[in-house]
Image (cartoon, rainbow, N blue to C red):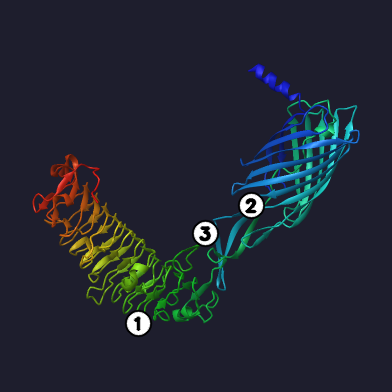
Amino acid sequence: MIKYVTLLLGATTLFSSEAVLKHREHNGVGYDTGYTTLSTFLLPDQDRPIYPMFDGRVHVFDDGKFAANIGGGMRMPFGNPDWALGANFFYDYRDDGAFQVNQLGPGLELLNRFLDFRLNGYIPLKSTKFKSNNTTFLRFQGHQAIVKNSLRAALPCVEGEIGSRYVNTNVPLEVYGSLGSYYLFSNKVDRTDFGRAWGGTASATLEIIDRFFAGIDLTYDRIFRWTVQGVAGINLLPKPKQIPKFLSQPIMRNEIIPIQKRKQRAPLINPATHEPFKFVFVNNQSGSNGTFEDPFPTLLEAQAASSPRDIIYMYPGDGTTTGYDAGYNMRAWQVLQGSGTDLPLAGAVIPAQTPGQMPIMTNLAGNGITLEDFNIIRGIHVNGATTNNITDGGVAGSYLIEHCRIADSQLFAIDGTAALGTIFDLTGSKIVRSNEFYGNGIAGGGEDSDVVILAAPNSIVRVQDNYMDGQGVTTSAVLSVVLDNVDMRVERNYSTRMINSDAAIQRFNQGDNAFILVSQNQFVSNCSSGLIFFPLIPISLINGPGELHIEENLFNNHTGTSMTVQVDTATEVTCSLNQILNINLDNVRFNLTPSASQICLTLENNTNPGSYTFLNQTGDSAKFQVQAPNASLSGLQTQNTGTFVVTPAGTTTFVQPGTICPQ
């Protein structure tokens, strides 16, 4: 080990070498804390017409963040040689914590024994801008939401400097001083200007016996104001004696990329339009301007004055439907937002302005809310519309309905039947979550479910975390028709007091590759069935495949079959970890229709005090495949509680777990 260290130290004598350890405090131009530096500088220690240089530096800030510089260049002596002309080029890096910045830095220098002249440039590369995701809502003003944000920008810079040294030949001591000026160029983040400032610098350094040094740096500009820094360090390697000292000095330049920070107070920007979000305010106790200061008194006025992408912000007003009783027709990309619910928007959260107080609306002569496309309904109490409380209007491919109370409609709570004529064209995302439904479908006649969704091809459907109380009026909590390549998930809903079924999912006969998950729901209605899955009849085509997963649900208090799965196309069905509390002879039924192509069933860890019925109407046992340990009915019985009925007898094929489903 000693031999290798000796060789390394011997090699450094061939160069005008420095290995410097130093510390600088406190803040400087574009940074808020001190830092420690380990650097090395190499230049040949022998006379030559051109001297190549290498300079590398690593910095650790007091808060643990890193920065670095690596570069090189050349110096060419001239004038016997009393002068040297140098050029250098650096790559700089800084981790700001919020973002990382890279920079290129060209430089020129003219040096002699007593004077130095320098000109350095600093050019940040990509990722020079940062906008915090932590946007804070401040207030409403006019038609806008004013927010506060943290912005940062790396600033291009150019600097010039003149330095002079005094060397005492009798005492190993050197004093160096410099004066300079710099300009911070502009940058822009989210319509906010950064940079554009001149600054000045002054510094003084004292060096003793070519080994120890200490100094002070002073800067001023209108952005970072006055900064005063102290620096102290030690050179860990001896300095060379073969070439003049002004030739062997390290390259002097700014080490840290300047980053300006600003707190922005400005309107919240819509990332889709790059313009401020427009809010239209409604309060039935106010005036007629639609601003925060003077809201519209009626929804119809807001509707007439609104445009696509506007946010209609409703206050509860006097707590009645006065001014809110003629429904609302949405326009594309609009949001209908209640003031009692938080509004997440473009990285900000606008807190509820009337917490716990939800505006109530209706339509005394039609639908409560008519959707268009890409609408959001949030925090609205839609009550007692004379037809449907909410309807898709036949044009809504995508929508989100959340945190609403939807009650006492004459027909459907959320109606998707208007899209029957255009269902194949309305691909999109349909999300209904965290709502409360009460007593919808007063008129009866079968058109009285809470959530009716017609899922067009390639759509995403989510019905999640809803509370659905039919109050002995509503036929079904969820009624859905699913087409091909649909991903539908019905999860964590609570359904009670329905008349017919808690969930009725129809898979259209062209529903190839549909994925349907019914999971962690509680179906506790005093009705005939908890879950019905069946084809849309009449069947004209036999296609497939598809997947149905029924997992971790609770079924209770049903008068008939808790779970009925009727299959027409090739379908893989997984039924696991469900708990059925009804004591019925026919609690769970899997029915393969006469024209069906295939069912592959996995039945695991279900609790059922009644029976499971396998009904194969095709007469072909190969089409009804059930995975079971030991490929036997007895193996299936070890994994599930309850009895099993196969009808007709012998029309089920048991296979080992993991067996591929025939297509």
Report the front residue among 456 and 638: 456
Which residue lies under the disc numbered 3? Answer: 347
Provide the secondary structure element on which disc 1 rests. Answer: loop
Location of residue 111 with respect to 431 vertically, above or below: above
Residue 117 drawn at (x, y percent): 84, 43
Residue 552 seen in this snapshot: no
As drawn, is 439 to the left or to the right of 584? right
Which residue type does callout 2 highlight? Thr
Report the front residue among 631 and 531: 631
Residue 238 drawn at (x, y percent): 77, 25
Question: Label 3: few (<14), some or many (≥20) within 10 Å?
Answer: few
Residue 626 drawn at (x, y percent): 18, 48
Task: Calculate the distance from the C-alpha at mark 1 to the C-alpha at mark 3.
Answer: 37 Å
Provide the secondary structure element on which disc 2 rests. Answer: loop
Tell me if label 3 and label 2 are in contact, CB under 8 Å.
no
Location of residue 357 with respect to 129 vertically, above or below: below
Provide the secondary structure element on which disc 3 rests. Answer: loop
Report the front residue among 373 and 100: 373
Which residue lies under the disc numbered 1? Answer: 364
Which residue lies under the disc numbered 2? Answer: 128
Task: Calculate the distance from the C-alpha at mark 1 to the C-alpha at mark 2.
Answer: 56 Å
Report the front residue among 348 and 346: 346
Which comes sooner in the sequence, label 1 or label 2?
2
**Point 43% across, 81% down: residue:** 323
Residue 63 drawn at (x, y percent): 62, 42
Which comes sooner in the sequence, label 1 or label 3?
3
Task: Calculate the distance from the C-alpha at mark 3 to the C-alpha at mark 2.
Answer: 20 Å
The image quarter in which residue 53 lies: top right
**Point 22% across, 42% down: residue:** 657
